[in-house]
Amino acid sequence: MPLHETWKKIVTGALAITLVTGSGTAMLTVPSTISAAAATTPFTDVPGGHYAEKHISKLYYQGVITGYIDNITKISTFNPEKGVSQQEAVLMALKFAGISHLVDENSMIVFGESFVVGTFFKGYIELAFNKGLLDREEEYALAAADKTTEWGKKPASREWVTKLIVKAIGQQAAATNLQNTESHFKDAADIDTRYKGYVNAAVQLGLVKGVTDTTFKPDSDVKRASLATIFSRAQTSYAIEYDGQVDGVISDLTEQSISVYSKETDTKYTLDANTLFYHYKSEKPVALNELKEYTDVTIFAKDGKALYVEAKGDEQRTTTVEGAFARYNAEESIIYMWINDKPVPINYTSEVAIEDSEGKQIAITDLKANGQITIVQDSFRTKPVAMKIVISSTPATTVATGDLVSADQKVVTIKSAGTLVSKFVAAGATVEINGLANAGFADLVKDGDQVELTLNASDQVTKVKVTNREVKVIVAAEIFNINEAKKVVTVMDSNGEPIALTITDRTKFDYLGNSIDLANAIKLTTQNANVVIRYTHKNIISMQFVMAHTGKVLEVDLKNRVVTIVSEQGVTAKIPYITNVIEYFGRPLAAHTDLKTGDVVTMTMKPDKIEAIGIRVHQNVQYEVTSTNTVTNKIKVRTTVNDTFEYSTQDVSFVKLDGTKGTLAQLPVGAIVVFSYVGNSVVKIQEVGKASNG
């Protein structure tokens, strides 16, 4: 029985497991004197550099594991290389899954004659049978076959524990699906058939890896450190919220404290030399100054003190807005600025940094009406707050208006007051057409558009703004009538209403990136129902036939089987689907319930119907390059949990560290790269840095 319902359960500190009871600024990082060496783990026998130090520390502060405390010296040890019995492993799995509290401590439990477990563990083993973590018939048979060791005291093997953890996180279906998948381990034949699918699933999910790159050693006994590592890794994909855990964004960071914004609240926690700092990209401790403000973080705290801090990302959750200063309201702590001719309110605090263009600190009273300002604000609060305000130093601009005669990226000519006026175009000049994202010079209509030209101090065009029309876009457009003679297309718009649009001499037709004529476009409407239409004033600008739609997920309607996306064109589209499989890298059995708001997806469409037959999720995954082979076009990389795999880079584009196009031969060993996945396929590999030696 899968345990999906337990993954989000809050696990209290009272459930901490004892395996064996012992008797004995937006752009700022903060300089720190607290080094990574100041604290390593809570246990004296798990030194810095131990392969499982991060996992042991995390599970300890989560309350999932405890160690051994000497009653006299009060020294705490973990015994990382001590073996784990099967009954101890089951107890830890139940604690991890957050269901150990369901044990009936008062019930009389009787197992089969050959199935022997310790009295303390009986209730937990029965609970594991009832919840599907263990198969009663299978474990009874294993116990009967080995009468030399009691089942409960028998050392837990790597393959047996692998099955236990895969079932604990509800991935038995994945194991069944991967039962006959070929393994890369040379000793795969030694894996018992009953465990083969579970080992394959655990490796694919990143929960376990081999003893070496090529061997799994299924019969080897599991050590305490190894078991802690497996459960810790499982949390990467299957999050559980524990008592004292806070997931949020670093809102303030000093040498003495860390403030975390979580669930609409800012909370400050103290730091000291015993606080452990980790990063999601590394299994070794990091220094405080490697954390960045306004990035995602998970901490475990007690009595207002941060015990364990782990950076969950490097992207600072900030946005930058530009506009003209309007006024401020000191009583409500709001600044108003003009953006696109609208007054936009932005919250600020008395601590906000305000600078002029030379970096000099100024007061808010020094801001001038209509002066250009840039505001950096957070993007993680429900009501974002300004963190920095900079007065922009911009060259004087002028404006020219008229009817567009011609335009390209070199010269724009307009007719103003009956006179032709030509202006050179500045580098980086933009085109603005209401309703058309990423408009370019090719979207301008000569002898039809009225435009406003923004000119810099050198009298060059920096922006062309169309003032007499807007472009509307229909994505997943359903054409249900087309009259070639009258050049009229009837289409269902984004609101589900029919609208008649006219084909003009300027209308462009495109099929999968190739220009086609009207006659071929009409023929295609009977074969390919998926069209993106751009139009203005009921005149069609372009009709683009596509086989897929890409956009951000807004909503997944499981009942009506509809996914609502915001397309690449910035348009909301409701797209029905018939597929039951989501292609999601790292999740072999992903379903529609795995889709989240904000996910970027590509929906492959049925050719003759507005219906998706495939959904592929976009995601970026970071790796370290360990080797490249330009002859076979293969790259070998290491994951954040030190697993390695090889990937064929045929037809994959490369981007170098400087942002320019590169080749596989230019990718150095040790480089940190980001694989851009669309489903299970890599479409781009981008170098983003070098691996740290720490």
Image: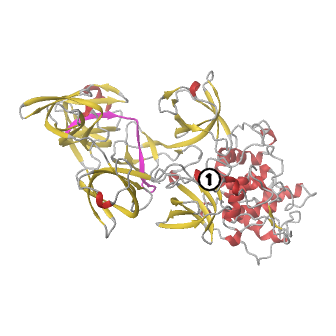
Q: Main secondary structure of the magenta part?
A: strand
Front residue (pair 157, 241): 241
- Give me the residue at 70% from left, 72% from top: 14
Write the start and end of the magenta stretch as one range: 538-560
Q: Residue flagged by tag 1: what amino acid is it?
A: Thr
Query: Pointer 1: what residue?
Result: 236
Q: Residue at x 14, y 38 (%)?
A: 401
Where 84 falls versus 622 (above or below)? below
Whether residue 377 appears in magenta in the rendering, the answer is: no
Q: Position of residue 345 (x, y in %)?
A: 30, 60
- Relative to the observer, which residue lies in front, 165 or 315? 315
On screen, 478 above or below 487?
Answer: below
Q: What secondary structure is found at the residue carrying circle 1?
A: helix
Please state, as top left, top right, bottom left or bottom right, where the N terminus lies in the image.
bottom right
Farthest residue toward the left? 418
Report if residue 542 lies within the magenta region.
yes
Of 328 and 380, the residue lying toward us:
328
Q: Is residue 633 left or right of residue 82?
A: left
Which one is in front, 118 or 50?
Answer: 50
On the image, the x and y values in percent for residue 5 come to 60, 63
Q: Which image quadrant: the C terminus?
A: top right
> Farthest residue toward the bottom?
106
Report whether 453 appears left or right of 563: left
